[in-house]
Image: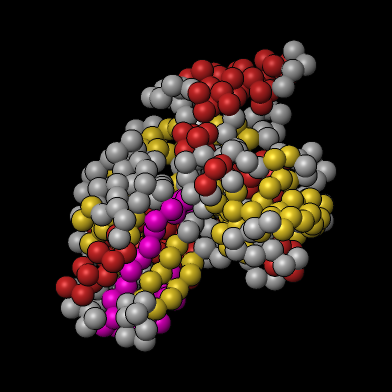
Amino acid sequence: MSGPCSYDRPRRIRRGAALTLIFATVLATGVATGTWGERAEGAVEASAPRPAAAAAPKGGTADRAAVERAAAQAMADGKSGSQAAADVVSRSGDRWSTIYTPGEFKDFQQQLDGSYVGVGLWVRQAGGGRIQVSRVAPGSPAARAGIAIGDRLRAINGRTTRGRPVTQIVSRLRGDDRRPAEGVGTPVELALAHGSHRWTVTLRRVLLRTQNVTVDRLAGRHGPTRIKVAAFTQGTGEAVRRAVRQAAPRSGLLLDLRGNTGGLVTESVAAASAFLDGGLVATYDVRGSQRALYAEPGGNTRIPLVVLVDGGTMSAGELLAGALQDRGRAIVVGSPTFGKGSVQMPSRLADGSVAELTVGHYRTPAGRAVDGRGITPDLVAGRGAEKRARTVLSGLGTGM
């Protein structure tokens, strides 16, 4: 197994003989503290950090040979090879490398393909450490049970949600902290509340499709088109290109990458191809060997474009924002992005688990390093960033 990828918990998918690069997420700090906001069951990210990884110092790089030796020796001693490998990664201080069991890796591949096991809920933290439903997938078990936006999620299978990180709650909904036998068709008991009314419902998990690209028109028929991309799973690039083709030529586009959790870099490059007429999207290195990623020719280079980013914009989202900024194709508005720009390479260990180890970093077309730095917007704006972005669009001749 070989080929570069970038993520923090995941990542490479094989399509025929081709290796798919992945740049994604895992908020070693944000996950641990629960500071990140809304999360969906199908989000392309780690479901929960391993305590050792969350506490590991920054700056190290795990050595592949040492990881493989540790796994092989542990198995020879009748111990867990994946656990021994994870211990080596933790001691290295490399917070982006990780070890997956075969089941964990298979589950992540499923998420990158745009599907997940769950009940169809998005949740966020509310005041007082409470967990609140922020969205419900239409037609999902949660929707059929009458769960609605604003309902409070009090407990999952009898375990309180109060004060717990959002990512941990999502993990419980999906069953990622489950026994191996759990998955599609397994029950999950939810304790909910709305105002003074409290009730309990048992749902069964199903296989759901993610909707990572949503499109709407702002300010009515003549306003700009907003394309919101939550993550780069299979088909995201084509969905973005379709949205661009259908947008009114003079209305302008807001490409909203706020909170984008990363995903397949091939899909990020495909999305870049919607706005560029070929050319460089990013460069990356794998153990000193330089590689490059290029957009396909034929993208719409005329429609005015503003990109919205924030501190939750990660990895493949940063790659896209940086490319459009460096190529002079878009004005970037918002707050500095997360700064995940390292490249991992997967390899299969002796016990069937998968090691994702850092081997290099990627750069924007202008040669800017992203890892640990992020993308700095052309116009820094916190609250009201979308309003500022629309003002910028109006100045680009959109006719607003």
Q: Is residue 12 visible?
A: no
The percent position of residue 112, horizontal first and vertical second, equals: 57, 54
The percent position of residue 229, horizontal first and vertical second, equals: 45, 62
Q: Quadrant of residue 325?
A: bottom left
Residue closer to the observer: 62 or 175: 175
The boundaries of the magenta stretch are: 240-266
Extreme residue in the bottom direction: 221
Which residue does the image show at 64% across and 29% down from the upper left? 349
Which residue does the image show at 47% across and 41% down from the upper left? 35
Q: Judge from the rendering whether residue 390 lies leftward or rightward of residue 343; answer left or right.
A: left
The quadrant the N terminus occupies is: top right
Q: Is residue 246 magenta?
A: yes
Residue closer to the observer: 39 or 369: 39
Q: Judge from the rendering whether residue 290 lies leftward or rightward of residue 94; answer left or right.
A: left
The percent position of residue 364, horizontal first and vertical second, equals: 28, 48
The percent position of residue 102, horizontal first and vertical second, equals: 69, 38
- From the viewer's perspective, is residue 330 above or below residue 21? below
The quadrant the C terminus occupies is: bottom left
Q: Judge from the rendering whether residue 284 lies leftward or rightward of residue 110; answer left or right.
A: left
Q: Is residue 221 visible?
A: yes
- From the viewer's perspective, is residue 141 above or below residue 80? below
